[in-house]
Image: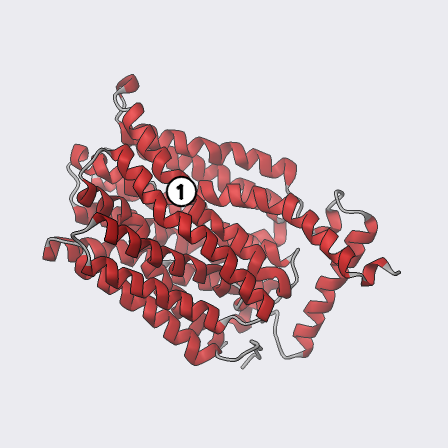
Amino acid sequence: MVHTESAVFAQQIFRKLDKRLLPLLISLYIVAYLDRVNIGFAKLTMTKELGFSDSVYGLGAGIFFLGYFLFEVPSNLILQRVGAKLWIARIMIVWGILSAATMFVTTPFQFYTVRFLLGLGEAGFTPGIILYLTYWYPAIRRAKATATFMSAIAWAGIIGGPLSGFIMTTFNGMANLAGWQWLFLLEALPAIILGLVVIIWMDNNPSTAQWLSSEERTWLVEQLLNETKKKQQSGHFDSFAKVFTNSKVWWLSGAYFSIVMGVYGITFWLPQIVNELDKQNIQQTGLLTAIPYLLAVVGMIVISHSSDKYQERCWHFALSAMLGSVGLILSGYYNDSLALTLLALSVSCLGTLSALPVFWSLPTQFLNGAAAAGGIALINSFGNLAGYLSPVLVAWLKEATGNLTNALYMMAAWLMLSAIIVILNFNSTRISFHSK
């Protein structure tokens, strides 16, 4: 039997990839997400101690994404040139230092500045990893690999809530530092440590992976090259300049913007929603906020596996986003019950987070080379402007109405819009794109 034509041989290779790549990538993303959104837990005491209003908090939470937006595309193009190992390590170490620096802020201007710089420092991480996965996994297996990587968002919620609550209560007052200051310091250290691990552990592409046999490397490189050739023959493109004139890229940017409006609205405000209903200590809040993310982990893997199995992306994404929207509507409607609100938010997290990895299977099916590096970054950077707008709008609606109900309905509308955009532009049983 010829090994390179064997399904067993292929499975052997992808099991090796999964074991070598995914645990590290998940760890990186968990730390990235914690350092990006732990501001939601810090708010429970930080804003009161520093005299910050909800508007100041909302702007500070969101301004991260302006820095992120500005450097996203250049960062991914640099990654393609210098290699993932060096560039991801640089990103990790820089953002770890900047995240820790948040513990020293005392004024709104300092808060805005360090959050903006944190966005600059972390820019390129998520699209860089999405691009990196295309170097290792063919399209037919990519949604599941991407989902496994992006399940880190849910794991960050599961780990981050209880951990943040524990740090803020246990370390509060130690060495004359507030609990929120210890939060920024202790959750930043793993980013710096993992940045050093990346240099040791990560390979830029399969051709340099010594943990694969020469036969395995040859087979995998040939599979990926053949896939690239088929894309080019089918009218797909690899020129970065063409990214800006391709309507599919802009529709995907709009869809991603819409779903991120829901993702970060939930992420930045979930601790406060739970804390106001539960009226218990911060550690209890941390434990309760982990519940929605537990359900989301299961949903992300199951839905992405189904998407890969049937090679269908549009409806897997759209139905997941719709489920997220319904969950937000129900959480707003049952806003006086902790149990029902948590259940509704769990449904919303399941739908919203399950939509994300399926979404990233769409652009990687028609972008190659520099177009993939720049196109993925462009979609991600444009979409993450919603990370700036969402917490600002939520804060404004909360101050205007006195509660978060209308803000939840607003986020639900954005999630529904993301589903509509994808249905109208990418609806087919088996997705096939052509440059226009």
Neighbourhood count class around disc 1 (C-alpha, 10 Å): few under 14, some 14–19, many 20 upward: many
Q: Residue furthest right?
A: 1
Instruction: Residue 263: tell me if it is visible.
Output: no
Report the side of 194 relative to 209 (left or right): left
Instruction: Identify whether 272 is placed above or below 177.
Output: below
| x then y, percent, for residue 218 | 80, 56
- Residue that appears at 36% across and 65% down: 323
State the residue in front, 307 or 64: 307
State the residue in front, 247 or 257: 257
For disc 1, the marked residue is: 158
Q: How many marks can you see?
A: 1
| x then y, percent, for residue 241 | 54, 70
Report the amino acid beneath label 1. Ile
Quarter of the image for residue 259 reads bottom left
Instruction: Identify whether 433 is placed above or below 130.
Output: below
| x then y, percent, for residue 186 | 39, 29
Quarter of the image for residue 331 reads bottom left
- Residue that appears at 24% across and 64% down: 410
- Residue that appears at 45% across and 79% down: 425
Q: Residue furthest front?
A: 339
| x then y, percent, for residue 297 | 46, 51
Instruction: Identify whether 8 is placed above or below 419.
Output: above
Report the side of 67 relative to 357 (left or right): left
- Residue that appears at 30% across and 61% down: 327
Asked which colour scheme the image uses, the reply is secondary structure
Instruction: Residue 325: tell me if it is visible.
Output: yes
Q: What SS does tag 1 mark?
A: helix
Quadrant where the image shows the N terminus: bottom right
